[in-house]
Image (cartoon, rainbow, N blue to C red):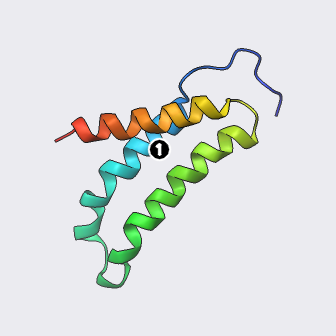
Amino acid sequence: MGTMSNRSYPSAHATTSAAAARALPPLLTPIAPEALREAVVPAVASAAVAMALSRLYLGVHWPSDTVAGFALGLAVAELAP
């Protein structure tokens, strides 16, 4: 994958993955099988962190882009009912 020349701030991938990591566990936990309920939050959070780190690994965002995107995603998710 080539390096993008005009990087965006904040990372939309980090933003949406963080928002999903905050919003999905309350929705998924009640419908998850009993044995998997405790694994919902760590699994969703791990996926969000992996998505944010992939932006750095691929060289398409600066660290500040991913941190700001993750923070924005968490803030937006807190506004959701």
Is 37 left or right of 65, judged from the image as shown?
Answer: left
What is the x, y in percent for residue 72? 41, 32
Binning the other alpha carbons within 10 Å of mark 1 as few (below 14), some (14 to 19) or many (20 upward) gives many
* Location of mark 1 (residue): 17
Q: Is residue 37 above or below residue 48?
A: below
* Residue positioned 76% across, 34% down in the render: 59
Q: Position of residue 65 (x, y in %)?
A: 59, 29
For image coordinates 33% across by 36% down, the residue present is: 75
Residue furthest to the left:
81
14 to 46, vertically: above or below = above
| Corner quadrant of residue 36 | bottom left
Residue under the point 31% across and 72% down: 32
In the rendered view, would you say 25 is above or below 72?
below
Q: Quadrant of the C terminus?
A: top left
In this view, the residue farthest toward the top is 6
**Does residue 12 appear left or right of residue 57 in this picture?**
left
Total label count?
Answer: 1
Secondary element at tag 1 = helix
The residue drawn where x is 32% and y is 75% is: 37
Q: Quadrant of residue 26?
A: bottom left
- Pick the quarter of the image with the N terminus: top right
Measuring from the top left, give residue 60's x and y in whole percent: 71, 30
Name the outermost residue toward the right.
2
**x and y, in percent, of residue 3 in the image:** 80, 26
In this picture, residue 52 sits left or right of residue 54: left
The three-letter amino acid code for the residue at tag 1 is Ser
